[in-house]
Structures are given as structure tokens and as C-alpha cells.
Image (cartoon, helix red, strand yellow):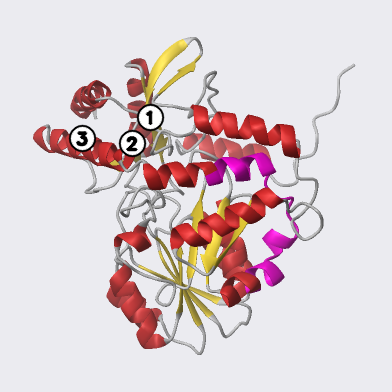
Amino acid sequence: MRHPAPADPFSLTGRLDKIKSAGLFRTRRTISSAQGAVIHAGGRRYDNFSSNDYLGLANDARLVGAVQDAVATYGVGSGASQLICGRSSAHEQLEEALAAHTGRSRAVVFSSGYLANLAVITTFATRREDVVVMDRENHASLVDGALLARASLRRYGHHDIAGLERLCTGKRALVATDGVFSMDGSIAALPDIVTVCTGHQAMLAVDDAHGFGVLGETGGGALQHFSLDQSRVPILMATFGKACGAMGAFVAGPDAVVEAVIQSGRSYIYTTAMPPSLAVAARRSLAIITRESWRRERLRDLVGRFCRGAKQLDLPVLASGTPIQGFLAGSAEAAVRGSDYARSRGIWLNAIRPPTVPKNTERLRITLTAGHSDEQVDRLLDALAQLKKTL
């Protein structure tokens, strides 16, 4: 029996065809191994240069063991939101460890960084006369938080401090910025941003998802890198899914800031708590990050090796001193072609296209981890040098 074609009142077929014709269609690829510097997919081995597992902890035996032990104690799911019965002693202990690690009064954990940023923006921008000011290259979750809030959203050019100051007007202004920008690897000029916020009595929120664990003497992130305490940066958000090798996120700051997020953050109140086992893993990861500074040192060495090689080969790579490196492709089609070429060489790289990055800045996003070898980085550089000749 033939079924009639379903109605398409939202023109989904046309929308999808338009995405494909623009070279912006995304394809999910499945890996069959644990996360790491080497992964397997479709029966083939790849050097993985697309993971945010910066310190190589996602498959660390100590975290695996911590999760296994915690599941035996707490079970698998948390069962409810943290304000109902989903908060366990594992969550409480993680929050206490986070406050100590970041040098802030208090912390609250979330199931994801996206939810944490939604809670931050909507908690502190609640009136139409409020203003949310942010860098144009901020993560999508910060932008979406501002769109959900009742305030006016104003965006300044990437790293444009003068533009920030021009927009930082209004009785109540919330300034939000990435600490390390996820697509180009640049570090926000946080001391300058703090100066502007102080002069305009604006509240500052920093999303340090890509700096936490990587920057700073003990992995405290961009704020530790610049020696900025909670009196100057009252809202810190960071995640466990990157350098920590786990999953989830947190917001840390003065007691009143954290309590306001707990009481008013809808994406906190109405979300099932992260599994206790992952809270245990994140706390174990914090201890490793603090103690094993060699991981950050190794990562810095590899970043230096890649940057020196890219300069010698005159590769079209964006300036970055962090593990995130951007190889400019010139177009969406070229970025996809570059990704396919890299995969043919046994290197896992992804094409980054609009709307994730602006048009004409399409790129291959390269991420280095402490788990990579010198030889892997050299193979990557050789593949990029060959790719440059074809683009």
C-alpha cells in the first residue's frame, strides 16, 4: 500500500535542498573507539585533530575507574532536577572542589555548558531596558541566551574594545565574552574588558570552556592566566567536556551570583541533573589537572611545534597560541574538500562553515591535545602543505 506524501507546510524539503546547494549540509560521522589522539571509524585508523579533549583525559583509566565505582554507588541516572531529588553528595563535593580550584566563593554545576550560559544570561538580563553586550564571535549559547532574555542585544566586532565601550551604555549592562574563542583559538583581552566594565559598572560573564584546564599555572583558565579574581570577573562559566575529559559545566562566582542562578535560571531549575558518576569523574579530573602540569607543558610544546611548522610552510593558518588552530580554506566547498582530503590521508579534520563562522572565513578547525605525538603533528603539517597546493 502506497502512502501519500506528507504535507510540508514548513517547506522542509526546500530548506534542506537550499542548505545542500550552498555547501552547508552537515554529515554525522560515527567513530567506533574511545575518544583520543587516535580514533577508529569505518574500520580505519585516524589521527584525530578535531577533539576538544585537550589534556588527553577523556579515556584516562583513572576517570574510567572513577565512573565505574560511582555507578556502583549512585546508579546511572540522577532521576530529577537538582531542586527536586537529583542533587547527590557527588554534585555537592564537585561544587566545593570547583570553588576551591577557581578561587571563587561558590559554584553550581549544570548538565551542559549550553544550559549554563542560557541560565547566566537570562538570570541577569531580565528587563527590556537592560543591555547585553558581546563579541560577535561568542559561542552560540551566549547569543541564544541573549535572544531568550528580555534585554537588548548589542554585538561588537571581534576583539574591538573601543566598540565594546561604545555599546556599554544603559542602567544595567551585562557583558559576555568567550575566554578562548572556539573557532580561532584567540584569547579575549580580558584585562581591557574588565577596565571597560568597571568604568561603566557593567557585570562581566566569561565563558572559559576552551581555556579552563589549558591556561593558567594550575589549569584555572583564562582568568588565572590574567590573575583576575571574582571581584573583577563575577561570573565564570566553564565546562567538563573539554580539558576535563568528562561532561557537564559549572558557573562560579560570589555567593549572591550563584544563588541568583540557582533561583532564577530556568535551564537549571527545569533540567535533570547530570549523572552523579560524571560529577565524580569531573572532580577526579580537577585533581589531575591541578597536579599534572606536564600535560599543559606538553600541549604548549605541541602548539609551538605546529605553529613553527605552519610558518615555515607558509600555511594559511590564523594566529593562535592555544590548541585551537584554524586553516583557512576560502570557501565552504573548499573546506569540505579539504576535510575529505585530510580523511583520505588518515587525518580526522572537520570543515567549519557558516553560520558557525562568517562567510569567506570557512576553515578546517585543528585541535591539538597532550596525547598527540610529534610524529602525528608532522604528518598533519605535511598533509596541510599538500592540501594548500590544491586549494
Question: Which residue has dot 2 on it?
Answer: 366
How far from the left and from the top, in percent, is residue 373? 28, 24
How far from the left and from the top, in percent, is residue 348? 39, 25
- Characterize the local packing of mark 1: few (<14), some (14-19) or many (20 or more) Cα atoms within 10 angstroms: many
Q: Which region shows up in magenta?
A: 260-283
Query: In the rendered view, would you say 207 is above or below 7?
Result: below
Secondary structure of the residue carrying numbered label 3: helix
- Which one is nearer the viewer's eye here, 266 or 88? 88
Sequence-wise, the earlier of marks 1 and 2 is: 1
How far from the left and from the top, in percent, is residue 76? 74, 36
Sequence-wise, the earlier of marks 3 and 2 is: 3
Secondary structure of the residue carrying numbered label 2: strand
Outermost residue to the bottom: 171
Question: Which kind of residue does numbered mark 2 sit on?
Answer: Ile
Q: Is residue 368 left or right of residue 289?
A: left
Question: Which kind of residue does numbered mark 1 sit on?
Answer: Leu
Sequence-wise, the earlier of marks 1 and 3 is: 3
Outermost residue to the left: 312
Which numbered disc, 3 or 2, marks the residue closer to the eye?
Answer: 3
How far from the left and from the top, in percent, is residue 39? 45, 21
Question: Which kind of residue does numbered mark 3 sit on?
Answer: Phe
Question: Which residue has dot 1 on it?
Answer: 349
